[in-house]
Image (tube, grey):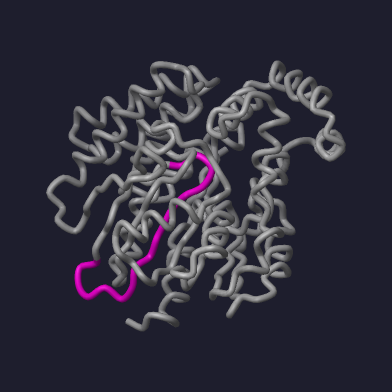
């Protein structure tokens, strides 16, 4: 049964698949056509039908010259594919190619490759139509591509900001260049600031970026304002958040006692029973460069806001959705309590009534953009 609340649609029974579809539907006709996506979702039964359906839809949009739609559809096609499948690289390449074609000729947008750790990380600079009030760095989290946030970045840029998006270790092209996911986000942020000669900037971190952006600010004084969009306290809590309560408790105990063998066996049994669990763990080990579930948990456990909250001295905006299915509900409170030395702390929790209850306000993303711009206006008046 399709939801009629705001613009968050219930098109697929599996919650994570449904949320992934809504990630593009939240941008309306700019990113997708609802009618064709709705028709496609009615035919999805598993990962194979997901890939085949989105791949076909992407090819059709490409033939019709809807290049941005095609780029986003190819991203959807490869989303749940195992990382060693040839089709994943092919769909990723088509996503990138069509996106570049879609923005070709736009003099306000510049693509760059920034030297980093013996290779490069990609970046995209979007200039505002008039005077630039400030520079804002914008990035995603866990395994995102910067193209996914292009429409959000452009909307913010049109309010008078120069936006620099980039992919760091574990994300998009940076990952394909061999850079595995890391909590040391100040390193790519410093490289980006150095490359563009930026001495002062705000930073917006989306999803897992809600930890990564404050982490960078804790060690990079050129960052003056921070937006956690949305709040993100500890990596391992997010990874196990969707597990049944009993399984969650067992994983916590086994991990805390460093019982790697028992933990690995427990996870491998779950992977055999649930395709989504199998994909999630395999993908997580791939982006972190780990070889076992236990080592993966160790890697994501290093992403802990409690370790760095006291080092943050900047102004910070914490956003949250009150029905976020990915982030534990106490994350806002824990982050705020850890910010002992921040210059100022502003919090905003979006509700069901206003349509912003989902993770990163998917379904009514304009709410979050409006809140972010209004907050930035305090520091950089129009």
Q: Which of 300 and 282 is in front in this view?
A: 300
Quadrant of image for the C terminus: bottom left
Residue 260 part of the magenta-drawn span: no
Quadrant of image for the N terminus: top right
- Kindly identify the residue that appears in the image at 58 percent across and 52 percent down: 358
Magenta span: chief secondary structure: loop
- Kindly identify the residue that appears in the image at 23 percent across and 37 percent down: 67
Q: Is residue 190 rendered to the left or right of residue 19?
A: left
Residue 135 part of the magenta-drawn span: yes
Q: Which stretch is magenta?
A: 128-144
Whether residue 207 is visible to the viewer of this picture, yes or no, is no
Q: Quadrant of residue 168?
A: top left
Q: Nearer the viewer, residue 205 or 150?
A: 205
Q: Nearer the viewer, residue 150 or 370?
A: 150
Relative image position of residue 173 (x, y in whole percent): 37, 36
Q: Is residue 107 rendered to the left or right of residue 13?
A: left
């Amino acid at each position: 049964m399709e939801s009629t609340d705001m613009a968050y649609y219930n098109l697929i029974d599996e919650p994570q698949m449904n949320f992934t579809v809504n990630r593009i539907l939240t941008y309306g006709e700019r990113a997708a056509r609802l009618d064709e996506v709705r028709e496609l979702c009615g035919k999805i039964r598993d990962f194979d039908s997901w890939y085949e359906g989105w791949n076909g839809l992407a090819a059709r949009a490409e033939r019709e010259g809807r290049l941005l739609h095609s780029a986003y559809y190819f991203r959807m096609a490869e989303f749940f594919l195992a990382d060693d499948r040839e089709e994943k690289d092919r769909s990723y390449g088509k996503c990138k190619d069509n996106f570049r074609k879609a923005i070709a000729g736009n003099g306000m947008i510049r693509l760059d490759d920034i030297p980093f750790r013996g290779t490069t990380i990609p970046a995209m600079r979007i200039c505002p139509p008039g005077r630039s009030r400030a520079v804002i760095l914008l990035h995603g989290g866990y395994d995102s591509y910067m193209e996914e946030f292009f429409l959000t970045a452009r909307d913010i840029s049109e309010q008078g900001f120069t936006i620099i998006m980039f992919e760091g270790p574990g994300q998009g092209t940076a990952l394909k260049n061999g850079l595995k996911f890391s909590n040391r986000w100040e390193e790519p942020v410093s490289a980006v600031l150095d490359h563009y000669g930026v001495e002062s900037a705000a930073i917006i971190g989306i999803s897992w970026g809600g930890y990564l952006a404050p982490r960078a600010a804790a060690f990079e004084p050129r960052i003056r304002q921070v937006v956690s969009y949305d709040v993100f306290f500890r990596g391992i809590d997010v990874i196990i958040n969707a597990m049944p309560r009993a399984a969650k408790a067992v994983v916590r105990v086994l991990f805390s006692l460093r019982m790697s063998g028992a933990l690995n066996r427990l996870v491998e049994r779950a992977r055999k029973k649930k395709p989504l669990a199998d994909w999630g763990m395999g993908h997580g080990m791939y982006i972190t460069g780990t070889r076992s579930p236990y080592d993966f948990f160790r890697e994501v456990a290093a992403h802990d806001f409690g370790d760095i909250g006291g080092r943050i001295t900047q102004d910070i905006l914490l956003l949250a959705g009150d029905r976020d299915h990915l982030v534990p509900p106490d994350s806002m409170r824990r982050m705020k309590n850890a910010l002992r030395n921040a210059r100022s702390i502003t919090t905003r929790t979006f509700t069901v009534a206003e349509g912003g209850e989902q993770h990163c306000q998917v379904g009514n993303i304009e709410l979050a953009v409006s809140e972010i711009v209004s907050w930035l206006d305090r520091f950089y008046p129009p």
